[in-house]
Amino acid sequence: MKIVVLAKQVPDSTEITVDKKTGTLVRDGVPSIINPDDLAGLEAALELKDKSDDVVVEVLSMGPPQAAGMLQEAIARGADKAYLLTDRRLGGADTCATSRTLAAALDKIGYDLIIAGRQAIDGDTAQVGPQTAERLGIPQVTYVDEVLEVAPDHIKVKKSLEDEDQIVSVQLPAVITTLSGMNKPRYMNCVDIVDSFNNPVVIMTYDDLAENLPMEQIGLAGSPTQVFRTFTKDVTAATETFNLPAEETGKQIAETLKEKQLIKK
């Protein structure tokens, strides 16, 4: 079984700020990490590999050249191979163009199971995994909290919702999206780090996909959505803060919204 994990390099959200003049994220000097939900997906794949010699784990990322370092780390954690889809022509892609490009790359490299993080901490859209499944025409299960069973023709998982858990079985090939709290990712060790450099990241560009992916469907040109402005809410002297139990907090929010006529009484 070939498992392909979709991974994204993201800025550490605990270190990032917003430029108040431009409304854009300040990324300079901010450390980059593997997106937490994606890292959980990688660990889930590696745990399946630990249980079977027939499982191969590969990682695919779309991003700038420096994302190769993140993918080298994935190899050092136990992945068998990693691909970086990087090309200036792919820049500016929204979730629509990104999923379209990832689907084309997945068709090229092949897969039995695709694991993607639920969402990325720098966008929080939770759209790339589901859109990729839709473009590939295969089933999907989102918000996976545990992998219960994997067979050659199906996978059974626990899907975690706000007020309940669901046990879902789906035929393969399929896409599942994972939650960061589902496991504890393993650490790299010195031997694996050294060995990883004998297994370099495979670089792919738009030219590798151009036959089945028109130029007008990628990058900024293929992105129907764009971020207009990003901002943070400033705390001023007029700001009121409350420290209340959950039930009282809900009532306080509802009363405030009613007072401002944002909801009906």
Image: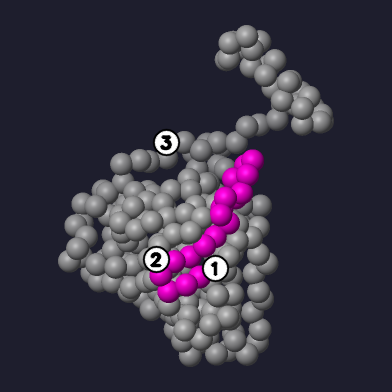
Residue 253, by quadrant, is: top right
Q: Position of residue 227 (x, y in %)?
A: 42, 40
Say what amino acid the circle numbered 2 marks.
Leu
Answer whether residue 65 is visible to the viewer in this image.
no
For label 2, the residue is: 172
Tell me what residue is drawn at x 37 percent, y 71 percent: 111
Horizontal placement of 145 versus 112: left or right? right
Tell me what residue is drawn at x 55 percent, y 42 percent: 19
Tag 2–tag 1 contact (CB < 8 Å)? no
Give the label, 3 or 2, closer to the camera: 2
For label 3, the residue is: 228
Tag 2 or tag 3, which sits nearer the N-term? 2
Say what amino acid the circle numbered 3 marks.
Phe
Q: Position of residue 83 (x, y in %)?
A: 40, 74
Answer whether residue 145 is visible to the viewer in this image.
yes
For the residues labelled 2 and 1, the Cα–Cα distance comes to 12 Å
Q: Position of residue 101 (x, y in %)?
A: 31, 59
Residue 113, by quadrant, is: bottom left
Element carrying mark 1: strand
Q: Main secondary structure of the magenta part?
A: strand
Name the disc covering residue 149, or none.
1
Tell me what residue is drawn at x 47 percent, y 54 percent: 141
Which residues make up the magenta segment?
A: 150-167
